[in-house]
Amino acid sequence: MQDVLLSNEPTIRLILFFSLFALFGASEALAPRRPRSIARWYRWLNNFLIVALDSLVLRLFFPVAAVGFALYVEDNGWGLFNILHLTRAAAILLSIVLLDLTIYAQHVGFHKISFFWSFHRMHHADLDLDVTSGFRFHPGEIIFSMAIKFAAIAVLGAPPVAILLFELILASSSLFNHSNIRFSLRTDAFLRWFVVTPDMHRVHHSAVRKETDSNFSFSVPWWDYLFGTYCAQPAAGHDAMRIGLENFRSESDLRFDRMLVQPFIDPGTVGSKRSD
């Protein structure tokens, strides 16, 4: 099974991405949580241009993808799990859990450290949230994130199949929790025991600093519960809350070229211009 998964990695990624994008995109069109403030075509065009550039940047800076690097790590016997000689199942499960914790810690760091926030804030400057927001990240942030992921793989000695499964889970979660899908309060409350829901993650995209600096989890919500960074609801309610950043509220800030230069505009201190 592992060999089949790894040998078909690109195909699996593409099928999953387009299937979930179509599913969540159709769902938010049929049952939207919030009305749009910006024309869909305008945001989607620019968000997809960012995705295309991110893909090119990854190819240039990381010719070997994360799964390929994990294969190299495994062949050389690097990392904690290779030293401990854990069973394959235990190594896969622990790798997924610890990598998810790593992404949580990285996310917190990208908010707290001024240099990283200057790149990450482009993701937060989107004025609407929908399924395309889940892959709207600055190329600089993509490079930093991949470097951190490579380091985690080397330290853990994570099996290649665990990396593939983790990346599929992470990508699926990002598409889901950024989507503009309406769930009943009861359904949302139930799902929050197991996954980060769109309502839970939307709080993280609030223009209010206290709410922006909460709900850092991507896949499972447990890290926010454990480390005290959970915020159940925005103070203004989901219908009235302002999404985005106070510095970047012009429609022109959503343009591809403006998104690329955003990290170099008013770098300042972390959250210096975010409202409290």
Image: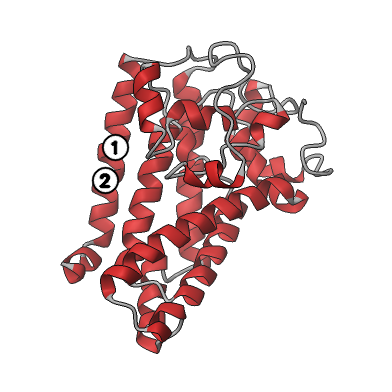
Compared with 85, 19 (above or below) is above
Q: Specify whether residue 131 is in view.
A: yes
As displayed, is residue 196 above or below residue 106?
Answer: above
Left or right of 192? Residue 217 is right
Quadrant placement of the C terminus: top right
Looking at this rendering, what residue extends furthest in the bottom direction? Answer: 76
Q: Residue at x 36, y 28 (%)?
A: 190
Instruction: Decide: is 55 above or below 262.
Output: below
- Amino acid type for the residue under numbered disc 1: Leu
* Residue drawn at point x = 30 percent, y = 15 percent: 30
Percent coordinates x, y for residue 259 in the rendering:
63, 38
Question: Where's residue 140, x and y in %?
Answer: 62, 54
The residue closer to the viewer here, 16 or 262, is 16
Cα distance in 3D space between marks 1 and 2: 6 Å
Q: Is residue 262 left or right of residue 267?
A: left
87 and 148: which is toward the camera: 87
Does dot 1 land on a helix, a strand or a loop? helix
What residue is rendered at 46% in x and 73% in y? 156
Where disc 2 sits, the SS reads: helix
Where residue 162 appears, x then y in whole percent?
A: 33, 65
For the rendered model, the colour scheme is secondary structure
Which residue is located at x 74 percent, y 51 percent?
113
Q: Is residue 183 visible?
A: no
Confirm or deny contact between disc 1 and disc 2 (CB under 8 A).
yes
Which residue corresponds to mark 1? 20
Q: Residue at label 2?
A: 16
Q: Which quadrant does the N terminus fall into?
A: bottom left
Type of amino acid at the residue the image marks with label 2: Leu
Question: Badge 2: few (under 14), some or many (20 or more) residues near its Cα, within 10 Å?
Answer: some
Which of 136 and 231 lies nearest the eye of the viewer? 231
Is the residue marked by circle 1 packed among few (<14), some (14-19), or many (20+) residues within 10 Å? Answer: some
Indicate left or right for 119 with 147 as reference: right
